[in-house]
Image: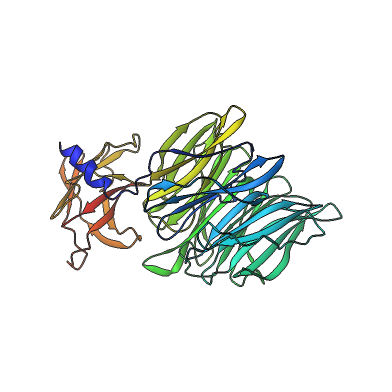
Amino acid sequence: MKKILLLTVMASFSTGITAQTLIASSHDPNATTNHNQRKIIRDADTNICVVYTTILVQKSVIKRVIYDRITGQWSRPMTITVGKNPTLSIDRDGRMCMLFEFNDSVTEIKYSSSADGSDWTAPTTISDPAHACTLPVADMDSSGCLNAFWIQKNDDSTESLVYACMAGDSLVDTRCVTTKDEILDVAVANHLQYLDNNLLFAIQFNGDSLQFFTSSDRMVTCDTLYAAMGSRPCISYNTFWYYPEETGIRLLFVDVNSHLTEVETISPWGQTDSRVLNYYPVDDVCIDDIAPPLGYSFLFLQNGILYHGFSYGVWWSWVSVLDTTNGNNISHPSMAYKHFSPLYADFIWMEGDGDSFNIVYKQDDKYIWTGMPDPEPGKGFYIAGYPNPFTDRLTLTIHVEEETSIPVIQIYSTHSELIKTLTARRSYTNHYSAYWDGDTETGVKVKPGVYIIMCSVGDKRTARKVIFKP
């Protein structure tokens, strides 16, 4: 009965669409292709918009489906325009911008926008019509400007990375960033919560050469952030809530041995570390938003299986697999990047279905609830808490396999604000306990809601969700 009550109360805090859902089908095997071309976005009210391509009368067309949080329903697919390889961005007010490829005499990059995903402006060409251009990627900064990159094919058989800035629906700047013999992939990220105009981007060129860059002046100048050998670059960028002058950056890529590699940088630029994760061979990867120091989600494909992973950062030796999806020829996953969600990840993928392809959506929790079975065997400890929800006092128990380190327990808000550090006391051999009364370090009661319990033991950490409901 207690478990049923817990699940019932927790469901009231859920958004209601955690199960995977078939939302559309396509005849295009590349309907959601290119891991850095974000196909799924959510607005401030957590409504969701997904774009994809299909084939109609031998033409590639772009369609969209929308999830309405109030009605709890997905819309029917609606055709937006002729084109392929769309990528979505969204500003803080919910205005959606889409870049895509349009095949005319040469492939052009076109732009369209919408206030709500229903009515879209007439597409306009923003690339040089004299050169074929491909793989547009884009993100929004704090001023509402769209920062975009794409690959331009030149007459001398070289390729250039082109940058463009859009203000409103107007193109205000374009410039060539670099020219190489070959450019294979591009990634871009602005601040997750629209707090600054810093721009991060990455390029893969000359086979397996990767370079990550940062610019604070919309590409008038840029600095190298990190360089490596690999492919499939991904970027996530956010700020420490309690140290707004410090920013956290996570970079992911697949190294030359097909291992997933993680890089962590904290500003001012220079404090950088990396590690190779124990996942091999990785065929595809995409990244979610980051909440320093609460970690971030990412998706990766390995041997046809889609994994939802979660990392607390390179200085912690534990990475969780939160969800595993087996399907029919799973391919081309995409994750929502903005608006920031500290508790769950929204993502899509494709599955083969005869001569067509299903597009599947899922929302997955980033942290499990205290009181639920521990899904992370092997990390050397586990934490439990009760009751959940709690009104007066939360009791936490920690079991450690080896007593080499005293557990450190911290309470965070869903905005990654450190609320309180708890004292863990040894109860008996290999067991510790701690208590939280729903207060801050100064003794002030927190507001009702969801809080994150972070437990660190040695070089490993894990987190749980709890509801404070006085």
For this view, does 73 lie left or right of residue 172?
Answer: left
State the residue at coordinates (43%, 58%).
340
The percent coordinates of residue 222 (x first, y second) are 64, 67
Name the residue at the top extreme.
354
Quarter of the C terminus within the rendering: bottom left
The answer to whether 225 is drawn above or below residue 24 in the figure is below
The answer to whether 224 is drawn above or below residue 262 in the figure is below
| Quadrant in which residue 439 is drawn | bottom left
| Residue 189 at least partly seen | yes
| Image colouring | rainbow
Viewer-side residue, 193 vs 227: 193
| Residue 313 at least partly seen | no
Viewer-side residue, 446 vs 179: 446
Q: How many marks?
A: 0
The percent coordinates of residue 389 (x first, y second) are 19, 49
State the residue at coordinates (19%, 38%).
3
Name the residue at the right extreme.
156
The percent coordinates of residue 212 (x first, y second) are 61, 57
Quarter of the N terminus within the rendering: top left
The percent coordinates of residue 465 (x first, y second) are 28, 49
| Quadrant in which residue 354 is drawn | top right
